[in-house]
Amino acid sequence: MPSAQSVSSLDDIRTLLAGIPGPDDAAAARAGEREPQLTKPPGSLGRLEDISLWLCRWQASHPPRISRPHACVFAGNHGVTAQGVSAFPPEVTVQMVANFEHGGAAINQICKTFGIDLKVEALDLETPTDDFTQGPAMSESACVEAFNRGMAAVEDGMDILCLGEMGIGNTTTAAAICHGLYGGEAADWTGPGTGVEGDAMAAKIRVVADAVSLHKPDTKDGLDVLCAVGGRELAAIAGAVLAARLQRVPVMLDGYVSSAAAAVLEATLPGALDHCLVGHASTEPGHLRLLDNIGKQPLLQMNMRLGEASGAALAIGLLQAAAACHTGMATFAEAGVTDKD
């Protein structure tokens, strides 16, 4: 049995997936018993009630807690940018990582607002993945190495883990993953990313279509697709999602790219993302289509498409409110309020 802290092959990942824990029904039952006693009409807090139950189920504890939220942003560079799929050059990835580290990005401000600890992991930015129009983006060993970096980011004591990314060219990667997993037309999954339009957009769609056609004979599950057309930061996100499941840490996914990264696990084992919520719906046109395929409803729709875990971190405020209401509200008996007949 591979270690829950590290894997050495894609088959190790498949083995870990096959043994992932399910929800904690006892904790969920305790939450279900308390919720109807709170001083409100049944169901009146809507999805907040669902969130508090979900937290108990996947934290394996009652009451739910959001006292140690964490966010991790993984950064990687992509060889496919040589095909002109992005409006920005690859060096922007390095520059933005420095901006994160100096506290100057949007994610820094959102994390400060909600008391979220932020970690930034740069993955071999000086060595982009290979151009997946010419061959696989990553060898199995390179993919597994990045996957292990993601697994290692999940630490003891986390209440919730927000996952995001930075990587010029990675909306092309996300589109190729989704097209490879779910079919359809490449145009269904390919959006403007950093602002690509016109002939450049047509070229981006063609790159996604050609890459998936090239690799289709060699991809049997989501992990194969990840190696073929993925990126290091996406592999790391997938690793963090799996490690979080093994350690009973609920996950908040960000936008299109992080959702695509997680989707490779769901495509390999249905139910692998039951411990995940999606913070927001990106304006990348493929994101809502992807969420339909993985059975997720975003918590927010804010017309955002920044990445860097910004939408995931913003949604933490909803989780904090859900946990506070479930834990802090008085029951009808405590408040001396007459319950319904």
Image (tube, helix red, strand yellow):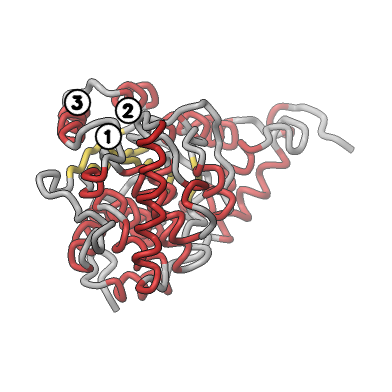
For the point 89% across and 38% down, the residue is 341
Farthest residue to the front: give it: 199
**In the rendered image, which quarter is residue 28 located in?**
bottom right
For the point 61% across and 52% down, the residue is 30
- Seen in the image, is 22 located left or right of residue 159? right
Residue 118, disc? 1
For the point 32% across and 47% down, the residue is 157
Nearer to the camera, 229 or 210? 210
Residue 107, disc? 2
Q: Amino acid at mark 2?
A: Ile
Instruction: State whether residue 205 is above or below residue 4.
Output: above
Q: Nearer the viewer, mark 1 or mark 3?
A: 3
Q: Amino acid at mark 1?
A: Leu
- At numbered mark 2, what does the secondary structure look like: helix, strand or loop? helix
Nearer to the camera, 88 or 124? 88
Bin the neighbour count of mark 2 within 10 Å (Cα to Cα): few under 14, some 14-19, many 20 and up. many
- Contact (Cβ within 8 Å) of mark 1 with mark 2: yes
In the rendered image, residue 151, in percent from the top left (x then y), is placed at 27, 57
